[in-house]
Image (spheres, rainbow, N blue to C red):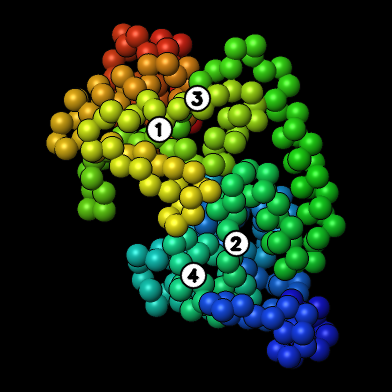
Amino acid sequence: LTQCGQVRPSDATVDAAAKLQSGYIRKYFSVPVQSAAAMSTILLAFIDSLGVQDRVNFVDSYAVAPCWQKALACHATMESEWGNATLQAQQLAGVDVVFMDCSIDCAKVNAQKNGVHVPSTQEAGPVENAEYIKYIAAFFNLEPQANELFAATQTSYAQASSGKAAKPLVVAWVSYNEKSDWSAESFVVSQAAYKTTMVTDVGATNLDAATALAGIKDLAVKDAVPGKPASGKTYTIPTNGDKAAASSAFFAALKGVDVVVDEVYAMDPTTYNFESFLTAYGLSSSSDLKFVKNKMVLR
């Protein structure tokens, strides 16, 4: 990053301070940037907090905050990567910086001349993820504000465990995937590290998924982030065409759970309710499951 009006350092000068590692590409930006794009709605929260929404030219169609909704209504929708590739390329080339996520590999970030990797969903804990506000702030010359915002986040997070129950509640993050072109019908327990950390940090207990689900047929266990064991695990139970049987086995394993965090995707979240949850998972309102009886289903 080079301050606006200053001479950009040479590669040799930068190498003397921090040599470029294999597999990485060095890119130069003049700061503060005047325009940007964020390829993930997750990153928009950082931009909101920093108050630089006016620098963002294009917004993901799934953005929900009021400012972003206004932008979408003013024809600032980012073209989907599954849509018009030419239009998306033009949109990305027209801004100073594109905040992106490498996901499995960084090929797309490396190929995008103004693309920058922001791995804010790949750290082990939520506080570590939240600290990426400092990284994004550097592009807008807002490091002091970012430091203050992050310090406030740390304080609030530390206070979240106050008043915890004497007997910790057992929590499970669950989802149901309908059969589609890209996935088989299945039930899932997610134990991504940042999720399990949030649970324990508020004084609750995570489901022992490895033990509870061990006897279920065709159980698949994978790293939450491929190739990164520290990211936690994802447990997937395919229905194999019999949703009722799979649901029965899945929830028998969750009989000791007090609270579930339902991660089912809903096209229209405003119409998704407790009855929608029961239907999606093949459950009945008369179920003896504690989280059903007590309606302890979070979204």
Relative vertical location of residue 256 with respect to residue 192 in this rendering, above or below? above
According to the picture, the residue beneath numbered tag 4 turns out to be: 106
Residue 232 screen position, x and y as percent: 49, 44
According to the picture, the residue beneath numbered tag 1 turns out to be: 210
Residue depicted at x 35% and y 43%? 221
What kind of residue is marked 1? Ala
If you read the primary sequence from the N terminus, does the residue marked by circle 3 or circle 4 appear first? 4
- For numbered disc 4, what is the local secondary structure? loop
Label 2 neighbour load within 10 Å: few <14, some 14-19, many 20+: many
Q: Mark on residue 171?
A: 3
What kind of residue is marked 2? Val
If you read the primary sequence from the N terminus, does the residue marked by circle 3 or circle 2 appear first? 2
Label 3 neighbour load within 10 Å: few <14, some 14-19, many 20+: many
Q: In which quarter of the image is the N terminus?
A: bottom right
Residue depicted at x 46% and y 73%? 107
| Circles 4, 1 touching at the beta carbon (< 8 Å) | no
Of 103 and 139, nearer the camera is 103
Left/right placement of residue 223 relative to residue 95 reads left
